[in-house]
Amino acid sequence: MSHRWPIAAVVSLLLVAPACKKPTVHQPIAVHIFRDLYSPYAHELDHRILDFQSTNPRLPSGAPIVVQSINEVDYKTALKGNFNKDIRVEAVILNGTSDIGENPDLAADLAHSVNICGAVKACPAIVPAFILPTATGDQAAAAQIFLNYLAQAK
């Protein structure tokens, strides 16, 4: 009888051990957005970003999505400069279509934009948001999930 309990303990341990696997931990995917931090819509957009984050957004793989606004560059200065080479972001949110000025790269990207006026309570103004073509893989997918969220009226 004393030989049975060590065997039972080993069998129990072998049955429980596979259930103790650690879940896969995914690194967060950061979506960097370029926007005017001082726009008339900035405060409302801040709230929408917080609302998005509170939904615990994830990619289909399970990786969490984190949205970060860049603030290293002045909005108007960046739009006048060599935007695609100076700024590394996945998504752009403009105050309006006229903000692109003479920037042909951004004008081309504007054709693929979504209007997020409902998200920032700016309707009937057009508030374009788009993903840059330089965004790829998980970051592009995460940016698309974020823009889809913003495109929905609150």
Image (spheres, grey):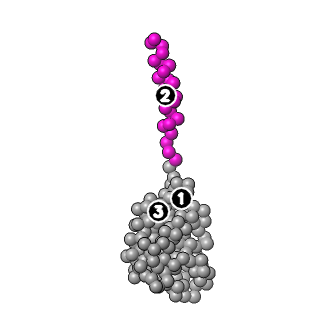
**Quadrant where the C terminus lies?**
bottom left
Q: Of the numbered discs in the image, which one, if any, rests on residue 66?
A: 3
Rendered location of residue 125, percent (x, y): 47, 85
Under mark 1, the amino acid is Leu
Does residue 85 belong to the magenta stretch? no
The answer to whether 57 appears left or right of 61 in the picture is left
Are the residues flagged by discs 3 and 1 in contact, CB closer than 8 Å? no
Q: Residues within 10 Å of mark 3 (few under 14, many from 20)?
A: some
Q: Which residues are magenta?
A: 1-24
Q: Earlier in the sequence, mark 3 or mark 1?
A: 1
Residue 3 sits above or below residue 102 on the image: above
Q: Residue reaching furthest front?
A: 153
Under mark 2, the amino acid is Leu
Q: Residue reaching furthest top?
A: 1
Residue at 54% from the left image edge and 76% from the top image edge: 114
Q: Of the numbered discs in the image, which one, if any, rests on residue 13?
A: 2
Q: Earlier in the sequence, mark 2 or mark 3?
A: 2
